[in-house]
Image: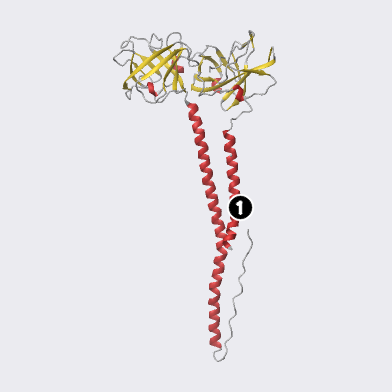
Amino acid sequence: METFKDFHRFPSVTTDAAKILWSIVVLICVSTVPVIDSQCTFPSALTGTWVRSRDAKSLTFSSSDTVAGLAVLYNTADIGDFTCNTLSSGRYIIASGSFSTDFGTNIYYMCWQFVQVSDNSFIMYELSDDLMAAGYDVRPGVTQSSMSAVNVATICPQSTSTKLFTTLVKSGASESDVASTCPTALQANFRYDSCTSASLQSCTNTKQVTADYAVCSTQVFSSTGGAVSCMGSATFSGDRYVNLYLHDAGNSIICWKIPDTSSAGDMSTTYYSGDCTTTAGSSTNLNLVFSSECTEDSGEDGGGGGGGSAGAIAGGAVGGILAIVIIVLIVYILLRKNNVQQVSAKNDSPREEKSDKKAEKPETIEISMDAEKGTKALEETPAKPQGLPPLKTNGTVAPGEPLRG
């Protein structure tokens, strides 16, 4: 009977714990759904004027969340500045004002995502498909009726893993201002071309790759001085792409494709004219032969190349969710254990008292019998002891191509 009572006490404990678990599961599920913010705001670090490396346009981001300088034309007319319209899972949808077309009043949308490399440079992904419509001289984005609702899936069909990137450089910044640590695969001494001695390295300054033309006279990266700065990198189709800032040649930017590895070794690489938005430009193969590791005191900075933080965030987010689930399970177990102990204490306490009473009664009766025998020794028939009162039981049961903007 007591076991049956205990069994029926547990549903209340399980129900309370289930409510807690269900609330947290719902919270986790909601946190993994793409978040659309009610107010779209550009990162404060973007405020100011930046030069976009793929087309050298100067884009000015204001504190009022507008961006000027895109010069998107429809039938030769500039449709004006763009405004931050929607922020969804790190993707910024920017929108033009309404403008008239042959098909009615439209709005032009583009989808961007940023990765900060340094105080003076950002990697910028353009995640819209090419706009295949007549009259526009700029292809990235989506044009739709001003009456239509913003659709994130339509405007942002690409991701950082399916698109290459361009770079934003703070207007007026020097090569040292925009430099970031080069990928670790480049932090070594290499031979290249037909040279027999090490002549290319990223050891003396790990934010730069330097070719020593005194050792090997073949020029690389179209650089007369042989020095380039790394400006951030990202993986695409199994390789790592690095935007390089040339210290000469008019501060040009080129794109260098290298193997996506964390260790230095022999490698076949290719660099392209223009930034890493596209690899459709002219290309040059550059084979590197590993010569030696950097010495411990030769480098200024350690670590890998910039711009690879998106995967780490996602992994961190997944790890955070797993940690929450584990904590929830621990809390549930502790709550259940605590309630079980309370129920057990409540049920065991009455039994102990009843058991004590049973033990005490016979002793009292036995003493009473001895007393009666002593006082009534001469009586032939001793008095019968009083019986124990009957025990009473309590029965109550208590979750393509980058768009060109």
Q: Residues within 10 Å of mark 1 (few under 14, many from 20)?
A: few
Position of 214 with respect to 279 (left or right) is left
Position of 144 with respect to 198 (left or right) is right
Tell me the quarter of the image containing the N terminus. Answer: bottom right
Asked whether the viewer can see residue 268, the reply is: yes
Extreme-left residue of the structure: 196
Type of amino acid under label 1: Ser
Q: Is residue 4 above or below residue 298?
A: below
Q: Which residue is mark 1?
A: 12
The residue lying at 38 percent from left, 23 percent from top is: 185
Residue 89, image x and y in percent? 57, 28
Position of 101 with respect to 207 (left or right) is right
State the colouring used for the structure image.
secondary structure
Q: Is residue 187 above or below residue 133?
A: below
Q: Name which quarter of the figure residue 39 lies in.
A: top right
Q: Name which quarter of the figure residue 74 lies in.
A: top right
Tell me the quarter of the image containing the C terminus. Answer: top right
Asked whether the viewer can see residue 40, the reply is: no
The residue lying at 54 percent from left, 90 percent from top is: 377
Residue 103, image x and y in percent? 69, 14
